[in-house]
Amino acid sequence: QSAQSCAATATARPQVQVSSRMSMRFVALALLATTAHGASAPALRLRGGATTKSSAVVAESGLTPASRCLSTRGGGVPSGVMSKVDVPLLSYFAFWYLGNYYYNIANKQCLKAAGGAAGFPMTIGVLQLGVGVLYALYMWAAPDSRSVPSVTKDDLVKMLPVGFCAMGAHCFSVFALSAGAVSFGQIVKAAEPAFAAVVSTAVYGKSISTAKWLALIPVIGGVVLASVKELDFAWSALIAACTANLFAAFKANENKKLMETPGLKDRIGSVGNQFALTTILSFLFGLPLLLAREGHKWSEFVSLFRSNSVISTNLFTSGLYFYLYNELSTLTIKKTSATTQSVANTAKRVIVIVGVALALGESLEPIKMLGCGIGIGGVLLYSLVK
C-alpha cells in the first residue's frame, strides 16, 4: 500500500504542475484580453515623427501588416477576409468559456480540500470576491489602464441592491458546488430563466408571453430528470442552487432599474467599472455573513490556507477566473445580438457541464445527460421565443 501511495503521489504531482501552468497561462492571456479592450495599435513612426513609407502603404491598402504579409506569400489570405473577422469578439468568447471552465474546476478543488460543504464554503466564496476587488483596484491604479468612475454617494446607494443580490447569487452557487457534483449544480443553475420569469411577473409586474411560459416546461422537466439519476444528489445542493437562481433573478431586474438612472452610465464610465463596483459592494456585504457563519473557524481556515497549497492556489485562481470570465461575458454580450447571446450561453453551459464532469470524474449517466439536454434546450427555446 505504501508503494502504491508513493507511485500515485509521483504521478499526481506532474499533473498538478501541468494544470497549474496551464491555469496561469490562461490568466495571463485573459488579462491581456481585458486590458487590451478598446485599445488600438498606433502607426509606426520614425524618431522625427514622420510615418514610415511601409506603414503608409499598409494604411492605404486597408490591411494589417500580418494579413498583408500572408496575402503576398502565394495568395494566402484574400483581401478583405481578415478585416471581416472580429478577432477581439472571438477572444472574448474563448476566454469567457475557458474562464468559466477553469473557475468551476479550481473552485471545486479548493472547496474539496477545505472540507466540502462542512468546511468553509462561505469563507471561500467571499474571499473569491475579495480577489476580484484586488484586481479591480489594480486596474484603477495602473497607469493607462482604466479610468476611475465618478459616481456619487447616491449612485452607490442605488447600487446596493445589485451588490447584495450579486453576493447572494455567488455565495449560494459556491454552497451548491460544495455540497454536490459541479455538473449537477450547473444543470440546476441552467433553470435560472424559470426563476427570472416568476420574479419578474410577481415582484416587478412584468408580463411574460404564453410561449415563454410553455418553454419553461422542458427546463423544469430536464432538471427533474437529471436529478433522478444523480449519483451525488444532495438536497442541500439543490436548494442552494435554486436560491442562487433566485438571487440572480432579482439581480437582473435590479440592475435593469439601476441602468435607467439618468446619467449613471456616463458617471460609471465602462462595463468594467460597473462590474468592479458591483464586486466591491458584494464583497462588503459578504464579510459580515462570513463572520456570522464561519467566523468562529477563521483561525482553522488560516492554518489550512498556509499549510495546504491546493487551497491557497485554487482560492486565488478561482477568484481571478470568476472576475475575468464575468467581465468578458459582459463585453461579449455587449457586442452581440440577443440571438447570438442565447446560442452562446447554451453552448457555454453544455461545454462547462460536460467538460467539468469529465475533468473531475463525475457521473455522466445517460438519464442525467438526457435531462441536461432537455433542460438546456428549453433554456435556448425560452431565450429565442418572443
Image: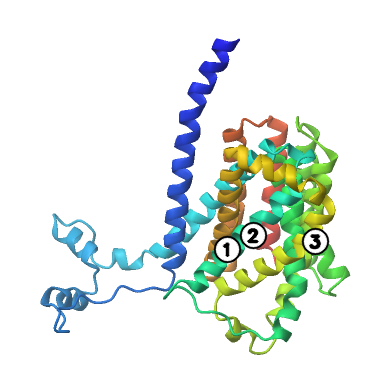
- Amino acid type, residue under disc 1 in the picture: Leu
> Which residue ends up furthest to the left in the rendered image?
53
Q: Determine the secondary structure under disc 2.
A: helix
Rounded to the nearest whole Å, what is the CA distance between mark 3 and mark 1?
A: 19 Å
> Which residue ends up furthest to the right in the rendered image?
202
- Amino acid type, residue under disc 3 in the picture: Pro
| Residue at the spot of label 2 | 130
| Residue at the spot of label 1 | 134
Q: Nearer the viewer, residue 245 or 218?
A: 245
Choose top left, top right, bottom left or bottom right for residue 144. bottom left
- Amino acid type, residue under disc 2 in the picture: Gly
Residue 170 percent location from the top left of the image: 71, 56
Residue 52 to residue 327: above or below: below
Left or right of 221 on screen, residue 365: left
Residue 173 percent location from the top left of the image: 73, 51
Left or right of 86 on screen, residue 177: right
| Residue at the spot of label 3 | 288
Can residue 214 be seen here? The reply is no
Circles 2 and 1: CB atoms closer than 8 Å = yes
Residue 359 to residue 324: above or below: above
